[in-house]
Image (cartoon, helix red, strand yellow):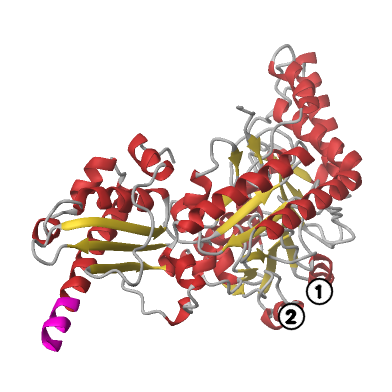
Amino acid sequence: MERDPIYMDNQATTPVDPRVIEAMVPFLGEIYGNAASRNHAFGWAAEEAVDRGRSQIADLVGARPKEIIFTSGATESDNLAIKGVAEFYADRGNHIITAVTEHKAVLDTCQALERANIAEVTYLPVDQYGRVDVDDVKKAIRDETILISLMYANNEIGTLHPIREIGKLTKERGILFHCDATQGVGKIPVNVDEDSIDLMSMSAHKMYGPKGCGALYVRSRGPRVRLRAQMHGGGHERGMRSGTLNVAGIVGFGKACELCGQELEAEAGRLIALRQKLYNGLTENLEDVYLNGHPTERIPGNLNLSFSYVEGESFLMGLNREIALSSGSACTSATLEPSYVLKALGVGEELAHTSIRFGLGRFNTEEDVDYVVKRVSEVVIRLREMSPLYEMAKAGIDLKSVQWKT
Amino acid sequence: MAYTERVIEHYERPRNVGSFGSEEAHVGTGVVGAPECGDVMKLQLKINPQTEVIEDAKFKTFGCGSAIASSSYVTELVKGKTVAEAGEIKNTQIVEELALPPVKIHCSVLAEDAIKAAVADWRGQGTTKKDAA
């Protein structure tokens, strides 16, 4: 019996909610004006739609609409925030603090600034769950520190940083706080004032909106944050990001935020229950399964597990026609390196190669979870029968003591 | 990444998975790779001591689909060959057969190494026995 494939990779991207599509459709067709056209009704209609979207996004995170700067996605938002601050505040200092488990959009941007001699960057370590220690942040602060950039929730392991405490610290010390909240916004309560966030990256496609549309929240007062624009042109978005606005995308992003806001609490509870069911099912069926990330301080939809003795790519290959998941295994990455996030947690490389990320989302059901438990268990059992490591471990050999021939 | 049909076929129906019992004689075992690298292959060859013909082969592999397919294919390839002939097998033959993409060539190299390691293990046993006799 063929069933539809199950999509359980919702930290990679999410399907667009049909209600979001419905809201967007008119703006792909009859309402085509340029939101920057101030002198005719076509432009006004587009502008009105953009304003509504801006308000919907601002409402979800406790911001003021004018503090929302539209971008092409979170990668651009991260670039704009970090480069924009480093360049604008260069006379005040040149030191940035971030963490080793940040998204590449943050890490590579920081490295680019280092190479250009624009900034010095401290990359903080994380604990075994992937959290930074607030004391480590405190100790890393120098007189020249102008920006701290930390993510709300990690995209691989779902771990939440102690954002509110860090926000409090940065506020006290007069340092700007950028938060890549791509995985957090819409999933857990995020409030830029309560969390003392000065700049925040967001992306529509991680919250059931369209791809190619994101935003950077830029605090307008207490303090008023300034940026050096990275995209020059017509001076859109208060001069911070030029380029004609993606009206349909913004309408979809706004609608997606509205829906996430309305459903957040119920949906978080539902996803946590599904996650628990998935974890219980898999650990009942299989031995030597390890949780990566924090047991409770994580986004509701993320479960990251290592299945010892089974390499991640071969695991996914056994399921990829039926179930969409992702792995921290080297063989699934372009670089042939296992996940740098899992490495930073001190998970041995061997466990990183066996890690699987289950990304639960709005359209996953209990039946999906039952099916995933069943099929994953079958595949793991089959591959363990084929695994020399499993055979050795069963024979009582300590794999760490073996001299491997590479 | 899309897999070639040959890789999928070996992954779904791997040939000669398993291990020879520890009591079986004339078995050479090669274990290559490391868990940290994401690939470990164990290849066992049962070799006729008179003719030096590989009469049976078994494998177990921890690794990606291409690593599993490479080792599965190698067990088919070596059966019936003499040890000397098996020693001539080059990884490029595995690459061609399975149409491995460039990023997966190391899987075929590992499979070639596994043959060499298994043969070396078998030869080592021979010497020990001769010395003992």
Q: Quadrant of the N terminus of chain A?
A: top right
Q: Are marks 1 and 2 on the same chain?
A: yes
Position in image of residue A87 (x %, y %): 60, 60
Q: Can you identify the residue that label 2 sits on?
A: A138
Dot 2 amino acid type: Lys
Residue displayed at 28% across by 47% down: B73
Residue A228, horizontal then vertical, whole percent: 64, 53
| Residue A383 belongs to the span the image colors magenta | no
Q: Is residue A282 above or below residue A41?
A: below
Quick one: label 1, few (<14), some, or many (20+) residues within 10 Å?
some
Per the image, label 1 sits on a secondary structure element best described as helix
Going by the numbered disc 1, the residue's amino acid type is Leu
Residue sitting nearer the eye, B35 or A18? B35
Q: Residue at x 30, y 62 (%)?
A: B43
Q: Residue furthest bottom?
A: B132
The answer to whether one can see residue B63 in this image is: yes
| Mark 2 secondary-structure assignment | helix
Q: Is residue A133 above or below residue A293?
A: below
Q: Nearer the viewer, residue A135 or A234?
A: A135
Corner quadrant of residue B115: bottom left
Q: Does the magenta stretch mainly form a helix, a strand or a loop?
A: helix
Depth order, front residue of A98/A90:
A98
**Apparent side of residue A68 relative to residue A86 in the rendered image (left or right):** right
Chain at tag 1 = A
Is residue A300 in view? Answer: no
The C terminus of chain A, quarter of image: bottom left
Judge the density around disc 2: few (<14), some (14-19), many (≥20) Cα neighbours within 10 Å: few
Q: Which residue is mark 1?
A: A169
Are the residues tagged 1 and 2 within 8 Å (C-beta)? yes
Left or right: A262 as drawn, with respect to A171: right
- Which contiguous range is marked in magenta? B125-133
Q: Chain of mark 2?
A: A
